[in-house]
Image (cartoon, rainbow, N blue to C red):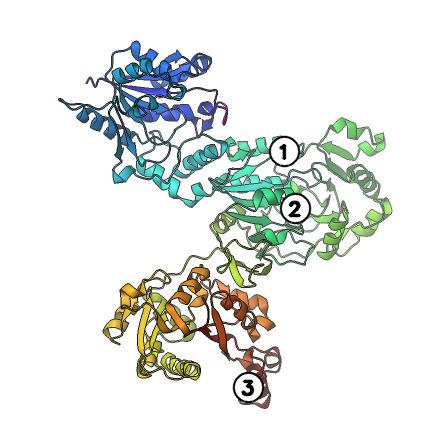
């Protein structure tokens, strides 16, 4: 059926920002082919590619394959190129697309051309039409063939000739141009799908990895879903060490983790490890996509999640990595580890000055085959000192072990020319020694050897898991310390001689006692999980801190820092899912922690509320008919206490079930609204309150600055602001800091320390009137734990008094007045 339409795809290969981008591979075809496939879905009589003479030869075969004609014209004068093409064909309507947009909304293109044709029926007329509001790179332009030919003759504006559409819509005195709001289905102006830069290209690869390869072009919904997914918005980039002297284990670990999880692996073009290309080829054969190897990082338009496996971060790398979505490091041993949001230790480090979030040797992939028992005699010895052998120990070690084990076969792995090594051995030595290139899949071949001679690293642990005897050589001072610390047999300061070998062979640590039970855990799966974590700035200061905020605690799911600006301890990285404060929070979750539901605990909570109102009264004196707003009021026990105290209570909470109860059962005004977003004047008809309270709520805010500013604005001058929160200076925090942060709820974003509260609250116009230490637990004191003293005993009472006197309660209540701002 004739349509009187022509699809024209504009393409040139001389792009300066991303050279030859149209021919870059995306999945199983070029970007150019993705565009042609999409535009072929739009109904038309003919399909053309308008290119320049230099690009024609490379594009013509691809055009023919896709069912497109290829037309060559002016390189710089794109408008003339289009007009010259249109002079060769008879058509009424042109649908224009560009070849750097592989994710075109062909459904939107079809709808927009139909709308254009509708507007040209009868006496009505339209020269140009496009949908506005589509993702940048997913739209097309529709225009009249006659109009564009006419415009090409009329305009001498260089910009008009560099493009096509501007020749019409920049001259609306002559041409009717419409920018139509796209239907809701297509309207996503915040998204970007074009490919102008290298970062865009990585983004496009991520989209293909997310959706998967399809025989048909992607639908609108598939593209939108991919663009909104975290894995596309924030690509995961692994950074292995490829530095001479660091071995090949880091690179192999990253390439292995990347295969299954579609991570990118960043290998700069100035790589220095000679084995890199060979190892990459090895993993390409195992299923790694060549698109996953990148030589530059995406920019801030798509900030990646950086996962480093570099042995030691450098200042240059920090500058390059730290401003991205997050920074995760494996076996990081530099002095910059505080910059890392998350630390995973797999091979134990000598550096004990910092704690990792998780330490687990189970992420070492265990060999598929294991020696069933220790050998009585050593028949086969493997000498493996890394691809580069930076210390040059392969030759002296081979000679020494040949003398010590003259009946054994010695296999020495080298990365260079085998012949150059063989020249170093006498004819008699050569009988025992075999010089070989790196062994593919060495891990699963280790069981063949009775003894493995290596340095501290991945091969050493894999050899232990394979059941081999292991002797380590001190390739660096650090390696020597590590070998000693983790009970490996090693040759220390002495030279690698026959006597030194015999001495170490008799070591009781020849077979190190490592925990080798259980299957290996998947490193790739774990990295995928922790990469979903969230980096959080200080809730008070945001990004204001000019210096690094030091880490105060790490555990398996979270990292805590002390803000360098205000001193607040805050949750800086979390892999926990965000909690929802619905009915289950007040019933099932609350019951798990306290043994009863929130409603069942109503009266005891209300009793605490009456005590707190008594403290407020000691500051404010007369509370009768004073207004009080309770933020996070839950089912209203404190509001009920305030009502009993002749105050005028109001409440707000984000749980609709809780607010329904407060309104219907307690008959107290309450709003289901998030704080600080609530407009109290609209909700309650009151602009400022005499008292505002937050009981175990303040620690739940990610943006505490907005909360405290709002609080300062709706508490009258000399009014009271009171809150309670876990104390960072209680006995639990002081006696067992790691456990304190381990059991801290995942939705607590700040840890308040009474001694620092004043300086933080002062910024918002509040002056502390009273601090009450609560939650005293003698059983949490080390002395009670050790002695087992019971409640009521003399020691118990003494510790309880000490706790009260020194304000060592695990919770704290802060009562302050608004005196400024």
User: Which comes sooner in the sequence, label 1 or label 2?
Assistant: 1
Q: Is residue 614 above or below residue 351?
A: below
Query: Is 287 part of what is drawn in magenta?
Result: no
Regarding residue 812, the answer to whether it shows in the image is: no
C-alpha distance separating marks 1 and 2: 16 Å
Q: Is residue 67 above or below residue 674?
A: above
Residue at 33%, 19% (x, y): give it: 8
Element type at marker 1?
Answer: helix
Q: Nearer the viewer, residue 627 or 723?
A: 627
Query: At which x and y percent is residue 211?
Result: 38, 37
Q: Which residues are magenta?
A: 15-19
Q: Is residue 320 above or below residue 119?
A: below
Residue at 28%, 69% (x, y): give it: 670
Q: Nearer the viewer, residue 688 or 454?
A: 688
Query: At which x and y percent is residue 152?
Result: 33, 15
Judged by depth in the image, the label closer to the viewer, 2 or 3, is 2
Element type at marker 2?
Answer: loop
Which mark is drawn over residue 276?
1
Which mark is drawn over residue 311?
2
User: Which comes sooner in the sequence, label 2 or label 3?
Assistant: 2
The residue wearing badge 3 is 790
Asked whether disc 1 touches disc 2, contact meaning CB atoms under 8 Å apart, the reply is no
- The kind of secondary structure the magenta stretch mainly shows is loop
On screen, residue 19 versus residue 361, left or right, reads: left
């Amino acid at each position: 059926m004739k349509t009187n339409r022509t699809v024209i795809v504009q393409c040139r290969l001389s792009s300066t920002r991303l050279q030859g981008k149209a021919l870059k591979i995306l999945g199983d075809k070029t970007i150019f082919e993705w565009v042609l496939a999409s535009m072929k879905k739009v109904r038309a009589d003919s399909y053309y590619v308008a290119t320049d003479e230099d690009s024609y030869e490379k594009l013509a075969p691809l055009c023919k394959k896709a069912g497109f004609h290829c037309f060559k014209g002016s390189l710089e004068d794109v408008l003339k190129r289009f007009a010259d093409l249109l002079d060769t064909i008879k058509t009424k309507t042109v649908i224009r697309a560009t070849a750097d947009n592989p994710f075109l909304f062909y459904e939107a293109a079809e709808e927009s051309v139909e709308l254009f044709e509708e507007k040209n029926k009868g006496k009505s007329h339209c020269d140009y039409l496009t949908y506005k509001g589509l993702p940048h790179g997913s739209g097309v332009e529709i225009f009249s063939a006659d109009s564009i030919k006419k415009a090409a003759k009329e305009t001498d504006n260089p910009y008009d000739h560099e493009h096509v559409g501007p020749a019409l819509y920049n001259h609306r005195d002559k041409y009717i141009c419409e920018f139509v709001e796209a239907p809701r289905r297509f309207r996503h102006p915040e998204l970007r799908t074009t490919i102008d830069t290298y970062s865009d290209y990585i983004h496009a690869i991520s989209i293909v990895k997310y959706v998967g390869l399809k025989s048909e072009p992607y639908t609108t919904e598939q593209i939108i879903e991919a663009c909104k997914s975290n894995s596309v918005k924030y690509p995961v980039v692994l950074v292995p060490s490829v530095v001479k002297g660091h071995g090949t284990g880091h690179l192999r670990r990253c390439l292995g983790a990347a295969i299954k999880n579609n991570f990118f692996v960043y290998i700069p073009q100035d790589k220095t490890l000679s084995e890199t290309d060979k190892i990459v080829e090895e993993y390409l054969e195992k299923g790694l996509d060549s698109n996953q190897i990148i030589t530059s990082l995406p920019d801030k338009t798509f900030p990646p999640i950086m996962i480093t496996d570099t042995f030691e971060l450098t200042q240059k790398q920090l500058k390059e990595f730290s401003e991205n979505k997050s920074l995760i490091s494996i076996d990081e041993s530099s002095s910059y580890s505080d910059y890392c949001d998350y630390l995973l230790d797999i091979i134990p480090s000598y550096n004990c000055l910092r704690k990792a979030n998780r330490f687990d040797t189970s992420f070492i992939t265990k060999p598929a085959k294991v020696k069933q028992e220790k050998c009585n005699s050593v028949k086969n010895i493997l000498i493996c000192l890394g691809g580069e052998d930076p210390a040059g120990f392969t030759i002296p070690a081979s000679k020494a072990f040949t003398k010590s084990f003259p009946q054994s076969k010695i296999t020495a792995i080298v990365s260079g020319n085998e012949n150059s090594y063989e020249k170093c051995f006498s004819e008699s030595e050569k009988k025992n020694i075999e010089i070989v290139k790196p062994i593919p899949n060495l891990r699963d071949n280790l069981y063949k050897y009775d003894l493995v001679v290596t340095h501290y690293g991945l091969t050493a642990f894999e050899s232990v898991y394979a059941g081999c005897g292991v002797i380590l050589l001190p390739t660096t001072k650090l390696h020597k310390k590590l070998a000693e610390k983790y009970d490996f047999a090693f040759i220390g300061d002495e030279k690698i001689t026959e006597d030194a070998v015999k001495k170490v062979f008799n070591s009781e640590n020849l077979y190190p006692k490592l925990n080798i039970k259980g299957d290996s855990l998947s490193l790739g799966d774990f990295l995928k999980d922790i990469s979903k974590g969230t980096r959080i700035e200080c809730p008070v200061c945001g990004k204001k801190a000019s210096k690094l905020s030091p880490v105060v605690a790490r555990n398996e799911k979270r990292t805590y820092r002390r803000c360098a600006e205000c001193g607040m301890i805050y949750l800086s990285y979390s892999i926990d899912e965000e909690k929802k404060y619905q009915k289950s929070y007040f019933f099932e979750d609350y019951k798990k922690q306290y043994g009863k539901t929130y409603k069942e605990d109503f009266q005891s909570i209300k009793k605490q509320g009456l005590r707190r109102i008594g403290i407020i009264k000691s500051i404010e004196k007369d509370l009768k008919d004073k207004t009080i707003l309770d933020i996070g009021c839950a089912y209203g026990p404190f509001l009920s206490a305030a009502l009993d105290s002749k105050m005028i209570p109001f409440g707000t909470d984000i749980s609709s079930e809780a607010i329904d109860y407060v309104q219907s059962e307690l008959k107290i005004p309450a709003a289901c609204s998030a704080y600080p977003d609530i407009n109290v004047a609209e909700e309650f008809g009151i602009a400022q309150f005499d008292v505002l309270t937050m009981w175990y709520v303040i620690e739940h805010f990610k943006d505490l600055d907005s909360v405290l500013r709002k609080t300062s604005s709706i508490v009258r001058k000399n009014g009271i602001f009171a809150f309670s929160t876990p104390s960072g200076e209680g006995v639990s925090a002081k006696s067992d800091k790691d456990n304190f942060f381990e059991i801290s709820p995942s939705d607590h974003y700040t840890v308040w320390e009474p001694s620092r509260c004043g300086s933080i609250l002062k910024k918002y116009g509040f002056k502390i009137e009273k601090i009450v230490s609560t939650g005293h637990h003698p059983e949490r004191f080390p002395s009670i734990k050790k002695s087992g003293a019971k409640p009521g005993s003399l020691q118990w009472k003494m510790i309880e008094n000490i706790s009260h006197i020194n304000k060592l309660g695990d919770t704290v209540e802060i009562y302050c007045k608004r005196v400024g701002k």
